[in-house]
Image (tube, rainbow, N blue to C red):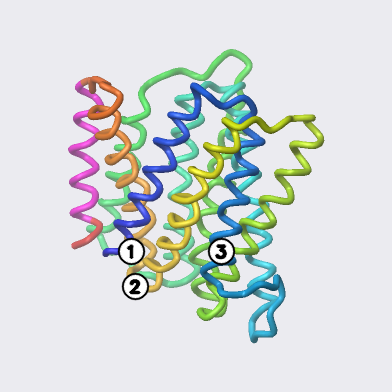
């Protein structure tokens, strides 16, 4: 449970730093590239390898899965941007978070993890809490439901890669897998920055470096927690646990006021966490 808690804490820090950066950043894509650079440097440090391709059994699978995950990371970010412009912030954020259904169902249907009746209730409660927490904003005119569904699937698949690697990848190469993930995301993001002609200012660099630290550890601790706990427990707990911490931090540090709906959602989340861990 310790690794899961640390993954949730790291994920919440990403959200809080992203929110703080909104006031100062100039080019979000440039900031994202620096974030992936920091993640890559941390992955190198933890892998203890100064080469991208060390001689090790299982390296081709590690390279393949890491590359796919890196492309999905950046693809999910771009889809979130596009959907936010077309469908609004609330719906886009809701569908992104509902992507937790993808790795949860994948773990049960493909990898044979047991979904007990209590866990099914817990997952259903987590989904209900996500919808409650994001509000009731309607889709904007000209919005795209297909885009929201693709966002859900892409976000869910990127999350699923940790479970897929846990099942099919070499345990000894977990740090190398994270390096490939973030390095591929970095290369693709730099190409995108060049295509968009985005420059890099010191604010983007600073927040990119700061966000990269919890971003790396969130992925690392999520992988470690999947080695200890069932994925059908880890993924929903990770998603709604992050929501709880971010919401409480908003109240404490940003002086946000929670309406009745959000207080109800927090209560539902606590019930979901209890059900998932019974």
Residue 43 badge: 3
Contact flag, marks 2 and 1 (Cβ < 8 Å): yes
Q: Is residue 150 visible?
A: no
Q: Position of residue 210 (x, y in %)?
A: 49, 43
- On the picture, is 161 further left or further right than 115? right
Q: Residue furthest front?
A: 202
User: Who is closer to the viewer here, 258 or 90?
Assistant: 258
Residue at screen point 26% across, 21% down: 255
* Furthest-top residue in this view: 141
Residue corresponding to mark 1 = 3
For the residue carrying disc 3, how many other residues have a C-alpha within 10 Å: few (<14), some (14-19), or many (20+)?
A: many
Image: 213 above or below 46: above
Disc 1 to disc 3, C-alpha distance: 17 Å
Residue 270 coordinates in the image, percent (x, y): 19, 45
**SS state under label 2:** loop
Secondary structure category for the residue under label 1:
helix
The answer to which of 263 and 244 lies nearer the viewer is 244
Mark 1 closeness class: few <14, some 14–19, many ≥20 residues within 10 Å: many
Q: Which residues are magenta?
A: 260-275
Q: Quadrant of the N terminus?
A: bottom left
169 on left or right of 103: right
Can residue 96 be spotted in the picture?
A: yes
Question: Which one is in front in this view, the residue at disc 2 or the one at disc 3?
Answer: 3
Query: Where is mark 2, residue-wise?
Result: 228
The kind of secondary structure element at disc 3 is helix
């Amino acid at each position: 449970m310790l690794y899961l808690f640390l993954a949730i804490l790291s994920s919440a820090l990403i959200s809080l730093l992203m929110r703080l950066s909104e006031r100062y950043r100039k080019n979000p894509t440039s900031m994202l590239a620096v974030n992936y650079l920091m993640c890559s440097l941390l992955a190198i440090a933890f892998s203890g390898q100064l080469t991208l391709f060390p001689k090790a059994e299982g390296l081709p699978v590690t390279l393949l899965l890491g590359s796919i995950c890196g492309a999905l990371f950046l693809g999910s970010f771009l889809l979130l941007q596009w959907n936010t412009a077309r469908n609004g912030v609330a719906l886009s954020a809701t569908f992104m978070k509902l992507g937790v259904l993808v790795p949860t169902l994948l773990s049960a249907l493909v990898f044979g993890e047991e979904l007990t009746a209590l866990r099914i209730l817990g997952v259903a409660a987590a989904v209900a809490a996500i919808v409650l927490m994001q509000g009731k904003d309607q889709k904007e005119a000209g919005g795209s439901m297909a885009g929201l569904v693709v966002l859900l699937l892409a976000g869910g698949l990127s999350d699923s890669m940790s479970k897929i690697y846990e099942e099919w990848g070499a345990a000894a190469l977990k740090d190398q897998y994270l390096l490939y993930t973030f390095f591929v995301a970095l290369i693709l993001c730099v190409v995108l920055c060049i295509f968009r002609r985005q420059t890099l200012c010191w604010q983007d660099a600073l927040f990119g470096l700061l966000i990269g630290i919890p971003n790396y550890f969130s992925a690392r601790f999520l992988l470690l927690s999947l080695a200890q706990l069932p994925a059908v427990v880890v993924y929903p707990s990770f998603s709604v646990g992050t929501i709880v911490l971010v919401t409480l931090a908003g109240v404490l540090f940003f002086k946000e006021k929670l309406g009745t709906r959000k207080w109800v959602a927090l209560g539902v989340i606590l019930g979901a966490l209890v059900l998932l861990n019974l």
